[in-house]
């Protein structure tokens, strides 16, 4: 989601991926509740205030709608338990949570972070 920012180094690739989703080349792309939770947490840690975060969430909602992404609710006891198992491999909390959420949907994540390879999550990179 941070790659949606035009200043992000992955923005060009993110736009290409979004267009592929919009045109049906990539199907069923989800924004999970766990990804949104990480997004808000990182923004808070970087000093964004609540009004700024709310505006960014509204912008994200526009992007989700425009490009045909879907929202998915994945946080439950099974996902959190799987998160803890993934953390045993050395993953950070949010990497493990995103992996568990991805596993619950279709075992695929869009990320350049190689940690997901070690967790047996299929990874679509920004450059694909």
Image (tube, grey):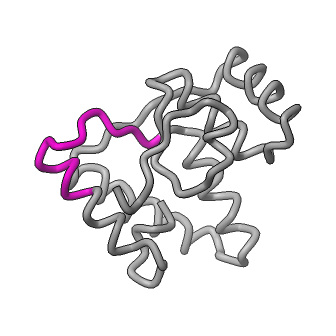
Q: Is residue 83 left or right of residue 55?
A: right
- Residue placed furthest toward the left: 23
Image position, residue 111 (x, y; %): 51, 53
Image position, residue 65 (x, y; %): 24, 50
Q: Is the residue 26 above or below the residue 41 in the image?
A: above
Q: Is residue 91 left or right of residue 57?
A: right
Identify the residue at horizontal 40%, vertical 68% (top origin).
4
Q: Is residue 20 left or right of residue 100?
A: left
Residues in magenta?
Answer: 18-31
Q: Is the C terminus in the top left, top right, bottom left or bottom right quadrant? A: bottom left
Does the magenta-highlighted stretch encompass residue 128? no
Identify the residue at horizontal 42%, vertical 47% (top origin).
124
Q: Is the residue 89 above or below the residue 44 in the image?
A: above
Towards the viewer: 120 or 53: 120
Identify the residue at horizontal 77%, vertical 31% (top origin).
86
Image position, residue 61 (x, y; %): 35, 54
Towards the viewer: 53 or 75: 75
Identify the residue at horizontal 44%, vertical 72% (top origin).
10
Towards the viewer: 70 or 105: 105
Q: Quadrant of residue 48?
A: bottom right
Image position, residue 112 (x, y; %): 53, 57
């Amino acid at each position: 989601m941070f790659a949606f920012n035009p200043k992000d180094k992955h923005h060009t690739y993110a736009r290409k991926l979004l267009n592929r989703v919009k045109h049906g080349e990539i199907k069923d792309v989800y924004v999970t509740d766990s990804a949104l939770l990480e997004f808000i947490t990182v923004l808070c840690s970087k000093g964004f205030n609540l009004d700024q975060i709310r505006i960014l969430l509204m912008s994200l909602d526009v992007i989700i709608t425009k490009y045909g992404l879907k929202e998915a609710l994945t946080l439950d006891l099974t996902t959190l338990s799987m998160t803890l198992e993934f953390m045993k491999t050395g993953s950070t909390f949010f990497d493990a949570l995103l992996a568990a959420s991805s596993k619950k949907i279709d075992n695929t994540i869009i990320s350049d972070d190689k940690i997901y390879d070690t967790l047996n999550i299929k990874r679509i990179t920004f450059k694909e």
